Image: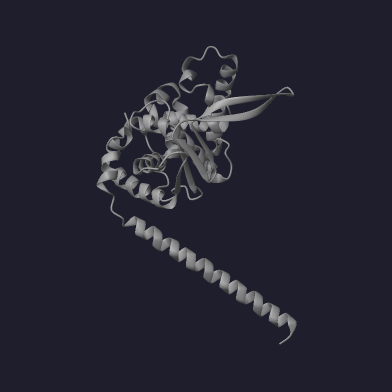
Amino acid sequence: MNYHSVLLLLVGSLGAIYFIFILFFELRKKRFLHEIEILPFSQQYKAILNKIPHYQKLSSTDQYQIQRTILRFIYTKEFVGVYMEVTEEMKLVIAFYASLLLVHKEPHNCYDNLKTIIIYPNPVINKEVKSYGGIYTKEQFMLAGQSSNDTVVITWHQAKREAYHMRHNNVMIHEFAHEIDYMDGEIDGVPPIEKSKYDAWVHTLNKEFNVLNKISNKNRDWGKYKLLGSYAATNEAEFFAVVTERFFESPHSLQKHFPELYDEFMDFYQIDTAKTFG
């Protein structure tokens, strides 16, 4: 057998081994996900969910669907506590709000790229160096949550306070909105949407973002834009995340003051939140 034949045989053998290796792990993953699908949803979990207003207002069909997504989320993500022990309540509440955003959209997606949830007991002081016209300054700000592709950071003190009462803000909805935004490979305020709907989405969001940005820079004459707040004017990605918060937390106000935004988000998330949570 000559050199080229041996090399061809070796490459073919390595390719076959690699294929078998991939097939083995795919079958193993499918079996693992199937085992999750048939897991019972504990009474402890149901008792916690029944305290969450958003869950209470879902239909029985959606409640069942979200229970299955919650289990998949909990068993496929790593939860890491910093200076604290991760409890079942923490896992469940965070998994619920992550699943809520996908309840009508992609219930079987479950943030496949997301690996780790890091939980802090309280907001973290983050230091950052910023440049203003060539002058560098060190600034500090309180970090309640953060998203970076495969990791989400949540502060439990704020998350727990927002989980059991519907208000304008919800750190969990905000951070998982960033994760959804990143599903197309970029955090830019344009989540994965159909090509036919792209232009309408960009036009509507850019129009409102630009107005908000100008108002925020002047810091006066806020009017209806007070509902969105200055943080939404940071960039298009933060605008998308904040509007997602309002869409799920204050749907009637968003629909009243920003009907075009509401319609775009209703079409994207495939849920009429004003009707569902009203």
User: Along the line of sight, which residue is nearer the eye, 248 or 85?
Assistant: 85
User: Along the line of sight, which residue is nearer the eye, 137 or 219?
Assistant: 137
The percent position of residue 70, horizontal first and vertical second, equals: 36, 47
The residue at 70%/78% (across/down) is 7
The quadrant of the image that shows the C terminus is top left
Horizontally, is 235 left or right of 52 in the view? right
The residue at 30%/33% (across/down) is 53
The percent position of residue 239, horizontal first and vertical second, equals: 53, 29
The residue at 52%/71% (across/down) is 20
The residue at 35%/59% (across/down) is 35
In the depicted structure, whether residue 36 falls above or below residue 239: below
In the depicted structure, whether residue 26 falls above or below residue 160: below
Horizontally, is 8 left or right of 224 in the view? right
The percent position of residue 15, horizontal first and vertical second, equals: 60, 72
Q: Quadrant of residue 238?
A: top right
The percent position of residue 72, horizontal first and vertical second, equals: 39, 51
Res 245 seen here? yes
Residue furthest front as drawn = 83
Residue furthest top as drawn = 221
> Number of numbered discs present?
0
Q: How is the image coloured?
A: one colour
Res 193 seen here? no
User: Along the line of sight, which residue is nearer the eye, 240 or 78?
Assistant: 78
The quadrant of the image that shows the N terminus is bottom right
